[in-house]
Image (spheres, rainbow, N blue to C red):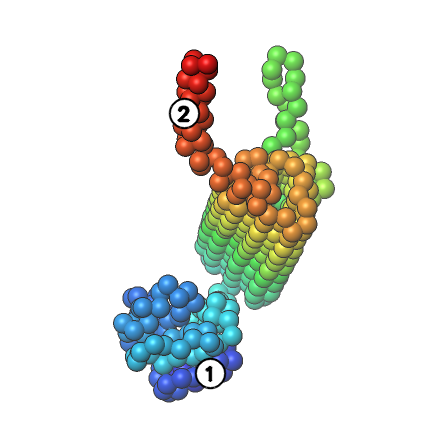
Amino acid sequence: MNITAEEIAQLVNGEVIGDPQVSVHAPAGLEHAQKGDISFLSNMKYEPFVYSTKASVLLVDKEYSPQRPIRPTLIKVDNVYESVAYLLGQFEATTEEYTGIAQLASVSTSSQIHDQVSIDDFAVVKEEVIIGEGTHIHSHVFVGRGVVIGKRCTIYPGAKIYRDCRIGDDVIIHANAVIGADGFGFSKRDGNKYAKIPQIGNVIIGDHVEIGANTTVDRATMGSTRIHSGVKLDNLIQVGHNVVIGENTVIAAQTAIAGSTEIGKNCLIGGQVAIVGHIKVADGTQIQGKSGVTKASKEGQKLFGVPAIDFSNYMRAYSVFRNLPDLVKELNQLKKHIKRDDHYR
């Protein structure tokens, strides 16, 4: 893909400062960019690289002004990250070319596959599956009986979608993710033995959801585990049975959500967070990484710690905790002074 600075500016509603006809063919990081690359500056700590980069074009904030002469043509935009994300999508050419059903794919004749669907070699599509227009099923994907997959989805290699699950439009499921495995349900019997509780529900995923590699979303015991539209799940996340995750919530890697918990919409959850079952995390909650959430939150609350408490309270408590060695030392010295004073009375 070759494109001029002027054409890029039109795409991102930006202002060109420099040569509007300079052409670029690929994006690159600021430090490693070469002639013909486009890069960006969104964090001022990397600003020194602006003066040494070999990039031909640089996306910057509208307020940015270099302190000395620079080589690249600038394109000033309202939101650098948003513009970069859009341009990366253009360079990636996300509208993959239609390839049809590969010879070595296994597709049940009872399934309804749109004419404009790509299914690669060694993918397996079972009975009564429905797959919408523009969806791409990569190699070694398993799609179980009765699954419904919407339009323009991308299911990457090795992903597994168990029976009866529902996937919306414009969903991305990355490699080796598992959608609809059994929830962790067992009942204790005599002699410390456990009997499996059948998991007869499913998973329902809304539109514009992205699910990271090796993430698992368990099917409901009864009813549905629900991932609402706009949710973004990182790699290596565990979502338990009957969990509900609200619209546009973002969850980072290695987080685990126990069964029957409801996560509100517009939440931000850091990495390695553990959330117990059967609680409600309110809309707009922000949870710092490595926290352990044991009770319901309030709307817009910020949480940190194990067990998680209000973020500001945690930081005040931590400021005391980190000074405990010095405080203990002072306390022991005071005790010695008191004992000495008592001895001379």
Q: Quadrant of residue 187?
A: top right
User: Residue extending furthest front?
Assistant: 345
Q: Which residue is mark 1?
A: 15
Query: x and y percent of residue 295 in the render?
Result: 65, 37
User: Who's the residue at 57% across and 51% down the image?
Assistant: 268
Nearest to the observer: residue 319 or residue 204: 319
Nearest to the observer: residue 164 or residue 254: 254
Task: Provide the secondary structure element on which disc 1 rests.
Answer: strand
Vertical placement of residue 188 versus 284, above or below: above
Task: Provide the secondary structure element on which disc 2 rests.
Answer: helix
User: Who's the residue at 38% across and 75% down the image?
Assistant: 58
Report the disc number at residue 333: 2
Query: x and y percent of residue 328 in the render?
Result: 44, 27
User: Who's the residue at 65% across and 17% down the image?
Assistant: 189
Mark 1 is on which residue type? Answer: Glu
Nearest to the observer: residue 32 or residue 210: 32
User: Who's the residue at 57% across and 45% down the image?
Assistant: 311
